[in-house]
C-alpha cells in the first residue's frame, strides 16, 4: 500500500497526511474499496498522534474521498461515490460575452476530474441583470432540488450577487468558496494594483510617457486597488499627469461594448481638441471593454501601436479578436480555479474558517499578442 512518506516540520502533520492520502487516491495508488489500517497503526507508521490521523481522515471523509463506518473501518470511495461540487454562475453562460466564466467552467471540469470530484454547474442565477436573455425561471428551484437529492459537499459561487446567495447559505449550510469582482466579497482576486503598476511600467519602458487609463467600473471611484497602483507607478517614474477616463458600466454584453465605444469616442475627441494632444499609451481594465475601445480607435482613425500603444487586462483561455494591435496583461484562470478548489477543500475538511482574513491574490503577466 502506498502509505509510507516522511512527515516534515514545515506544516501540521494532519495537513501533510491529508494531502499525501489525497494524492495517492487521485493517482490510483489507493484504489476504490481499499481498507486503510486502523488509526493506531497509521499513527505508528508515520510517528504522529492518533489525533493527527483522525483529523486527516475526517477531512478526507468530508471531501468525499473516504467512507468511514464504525466497526468496519475506513475505505477509499469509488468514483461514483465521490463528492459532488456545485458551480453556481451568476451570469448566463449562453451570453456571447461571458467568455471568462466559460473559461472558468472548462478549467473547473478539468481540475475537479483530477481530484476525482464530480461537478454540476448552474448558470443564469443573476438573470435580473440580463433582460435580453430568456429568463431561466426554474434555475433556483432546480439547484435547490439537486442539493436536496444529491450528495453535495460544497459550492463555488462565481459572480453571484450576495443578496441571492445569503438565503441559500442559510438554508443548506454547505461550505463554499466565492469569486466575485466586488472588492471584499471574494476569496480569490486578481491583483489589480500590480496589474496597473506593471502596465504603466511596461509602457514607460517602451518610451510611452503620456498615459491614459480607461476604467469601466460598476460605479465611479477615486480610490481602488487599480487606481492606486496606476498612480503609484506614475509617481515612482515621475511621469506627466495621466488622463483617467471612467465609463460606468450600466449594461452587460453587447450593450456594454457599445457604451464603452461611445465613452472612448468622447475621450478621443477631447484629446484631439487639446493642445497636449493624444496620449501615446493607454491601459484598459477589461478585455470585453477592449473590443469597444478598438471600435472607437478604428472609427477615429487612430493607429494603435504607432500612435497609441494599448495594454489591456485579459484572461487565459479567452482570446478575443480586437482588430488592432493589443498587449495583453493576462491572468491565469487555472490559478483562480485551483485556489478556489483548495479553499473549498479546506472548508469541507474543517481546516479553515468560513472566510479568510484576506482574499488570495493572483498575479498576471504581460503577453505581447497581436490581433
Image (cartoon, rainbow, N blue to C red):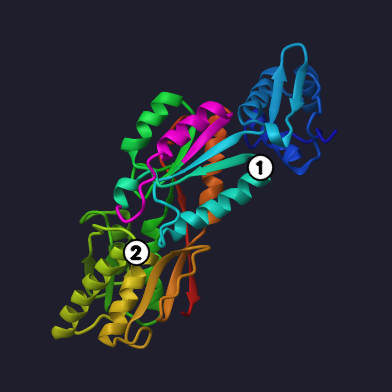
Q: Nearer the viewer, residue 112 or 51?
A: 112
Q: Where's residue 88, x and y in %?
A: 46, 42
For the point 80% across and 35% down, which residue is it?
Answer: 31
Judge left or right: residue 289 versus residue 39. Answer: left
Mark 2 — residue? 285
Residue 249: which quarter of the image? bottom left
Which is more N-terminal, label 1 or label 2?
Answer: 1
Label 2: state its secondary structure.
Answer: loop
For the point 42% across and 58% down, which residue is it?
Answer: 98
How many marks the image carries: the answer is 2
Residue 151: which quarter of the image? top right
For the point 41% across and 76% down, which residue is it?
Answer: 322
Mark 1 — residue? 115
Label 1: state its secondary structure.
Answer: loop
User: Quick check: marks 2 and 1 in contact, CB under 8 Å?
Assistant: no
Q: Is residue 366 above or below residue 128?
A: below
Q: Nearer the viewer, residue 55 or 318?
A: 318
Could you tell me how far apart the alpha carbons at marks 2 and 1 are, in whole angstroms?
Answer: 33 Å
Judge left or right: residue 5 versus residue 236. Answer: right
Q: Nearer the viewer, residue 256 or 199?
A: 256
**Magenta-highlighted residues:** 131-156
Q: Where's residue 207, x and y in %?
A: 36, 82
Residue 49 seen in the current view: no
Q: Is residue 258 above or below residue 162?
A: below
Judge left or right: residue 15 versus residue 157. Answer: right
Q: Is residue 89 magenta?
A: no
Q: Where's residue 366, x and y in %?
A: 47, 69
Residue 120 seen in the current view: yes
Amino acid at each position: 500500500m502506498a502509505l509510507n512518506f516522511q512527515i516534515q516540520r514545515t506544516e501540521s502533520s494532519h495537513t501533510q497526511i491529508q494531502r499525501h492520502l489525497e494524492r495517492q487516491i487521485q493517482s490510483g495508488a489507493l484504489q476504490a474499496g481499499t481498507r486503510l489500517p486502523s488509526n493506531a497503526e497509521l499513527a505508528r507508521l508515520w510517528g504522529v498522534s492518533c489525533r493527527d490521523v483522525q483529523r486527516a481522515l475526517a477531512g478526507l471523509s468530508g471531501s468525499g474521498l473516504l467512507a468511514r463506518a464504525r466497526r468496519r473501518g475506513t475505505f477509499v470511495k469509488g468514483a461514483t461515490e465521490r463528492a459532488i461540487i456545485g458551480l453556481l454562475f451568476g451570469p448566463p453562460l449562453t451570453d456571447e460575452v461571458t467568455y471568462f466564466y466559460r473559461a472558468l467552467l472548462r478549467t473547473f471540469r478539468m481540475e475537479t476530474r483530477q481530484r476525482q470530484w464530480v461537478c454540476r454547474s448552474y448558470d443564469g442565477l443573476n438573470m435580473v441583470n440580463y433582460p435580453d436573455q430568456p429568463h431561466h425561471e426554474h434555475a433556483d428551484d432546480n439547484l435547490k432540488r439537486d442539493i436536496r437529492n444529491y450528495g453535495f459537499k460544497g459550492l463555488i459561487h462565481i459572480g453571484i450577487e450576495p443578496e441571492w446567495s445569503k438565503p441559500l447559505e442559510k438554508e443548506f449550510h454547505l461550505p463554499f468558496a466565492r469569486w466575485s469582482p466586488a472588492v471584499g466579497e471574494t476569496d480569490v482576486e486578481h491583483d489589480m494594483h500590480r496589474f496597473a503598476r506593471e502596465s504603466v511600467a511596461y509602457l514607460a519602458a517602451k518610451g510611452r510617457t503620456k498615459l491614459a487609463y480607461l476604467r469601466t467600473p460598476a460605479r465611479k471611484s477615486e480610490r481602488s486597488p487599480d487606481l492606486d497602483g496606476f498612480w503609484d507607478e506614475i509617481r515612482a517614474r515621475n511621469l506627466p499627469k495621466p488622463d483617467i477616463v471612467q465609463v460606468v458600466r450600466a449594461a452587460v454584453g453587447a450593450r456594454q461594448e457599445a457604451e464603452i465605444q461611445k465613452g472612448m469616442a468622447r475621450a478621443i475627441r477631447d484629446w484631439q481638441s487639446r493642445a497636449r494632444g493624444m496620449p501615446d499609451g493607454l491601459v484598459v481594465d477589461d478585455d470585453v471593454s477592449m473590443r469597444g475601445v478598438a471600435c472607437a480607435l478604428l472609427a477615429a482613425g487612430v493607429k494603435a501601436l504607432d500612435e497609441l500603444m494599448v495594454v489591456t487586462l485579459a484572461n487565459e483561455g479567452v482570446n478575443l479578436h480586437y482588430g488592432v494591435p493589443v498587449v495583453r496583461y493576462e491572468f491565469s484562470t487555472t490559478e483562480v480555479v485551483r485556489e478556489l478548489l483548495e479553499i473549498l477543500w479546506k472548508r469541507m475538511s474543517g481546516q479553515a474558517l468560513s472566510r479568510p482574513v484576506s482574499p488570495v491574490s493572483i498575479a498576471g503577466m504581460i503577453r505581447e499578442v497581436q490581433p
